[in-house]
Amino acid sequence: MEKPYSSASKALIVGAAVVIIIAGMKQAASLLVPFLLSIFIAVISFPLMSRLQQNGLPKGLAIVVVIAVVILFGFALTILIGSSITDFSQALPGYQQRISARWLEVLQWLNNHGISVSETFRDIADPGAAVGLLSSILRAFGSVLTNSFLIILTVVFILMETAGLTQKFLSVTDTESARSGSDENDFAQVFVKKLRDYMSMKTIISMATGVLIGGALWLIGVDYPVLWGVLAFMLNFVPNIGSIIAAVPAVLLTLVQLGMVPAVLVAAVYVVVNIVIGSFIEPKYMGKELGLSTLVVFVSLVFWGWVLGPVGMLLSVPLTITVKLALDSKPETRWLGHLLGPAEV
């Protein structure tokens, strides 16, 4: 008779398995990123399909309508963002030079007023490098857009199978609950409902954020307002620090393009929009229990960005919030979901 593994041996085996899985995900990032994007798009599209079916539209016609909306939105986004990314990448060296020149002027002004700035600080706090990092993120997103046909096709098949997959998932959990005597079916229903509600509401709020930001920057006269609006839409899925990441490059480029006053105005637009949406609208319609700790958000950004690349940073919070919803939906793991949530004041 074989001896059972000790707790230390089990922990070592589990840790080794996790390392192998993460290494495999990192190597397969080029395949995983389009697939995860497809799942993300399908999840936020499914509530629309369900609503159409509830209003009396046949299932096949509802799928066709949703697929048509996804295809039109996807191609429009590809055309708009693709051209903006190309133009922005071509104009980026000039912007970086002007931003670096302004930064040197600020450092010189500080030195003239008796505030010495070390070379280390100059290397670390380089606004031109921050804009260059944004360019690398946009290039990575642009490379994903080249797989837009594959992504849309995968979304189509996922939507066609969503209802069946949900029923299979519920039937499996129902069978398991009958065997074990637990209430796994209720857990599955609660988790699926929470995930759909969260993704659909977060998408609507993020779209409103992107439209407000893009429209305001267009009125101010900032270059590439559509690009900044889409960036604000995507980064609104990253709570707490996403708005800062979206605002910094837009403010810097407004500074070198239009001057100090418009840059302050752009910063004020970002602050007002994110305070109104983040402090009033989201808590009202989504609830505070769906939030994440700032530390968890930062760690998930670093981890998924390292595993899946820049696009993984955009998917980090949806992936983490999915884990949190799964933990919150089951009584035995609810305490883990609570640990991932924001601190209670």
Image: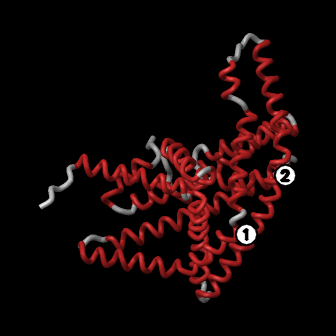
Q: Residue at x 55, y 47 (%)?
A: 306
Residue 310 x %, y %: 63, 50
Residue wearing tag 1? 73
Question: Dot 1: what SS?
Answer: helix
Where is residue 171, by image quadrant?
bottom left
Q: Is residue 13 above or below residue 266?
A: below
Say whether residue 249 is left or right of residue 323: right
**Numbered tag placed on residue 250 in the rendering:** none
Please state which of the two labelled residues, at mark 1 or mark 2, is closer to the viewer.
2
Amino acid type indicated by mark 2: Asp
Q: Residue at x 52, y 47 (%)?
A: 303
**Whole-Å distance between the Cαs marked 1 and 2?**
21 Å
Residue wearing tag 2? 87
Disc on the earlier residue, 1 or 2: 1
Say whether residue 287 is left or right of residue 206: left
Q: Is residue 168 above or below residue 129?
A: below
Residue 69 x %, y %: 70, 75
Q: Where does the N terminus fall, quadrant-wise?
A: bottom left
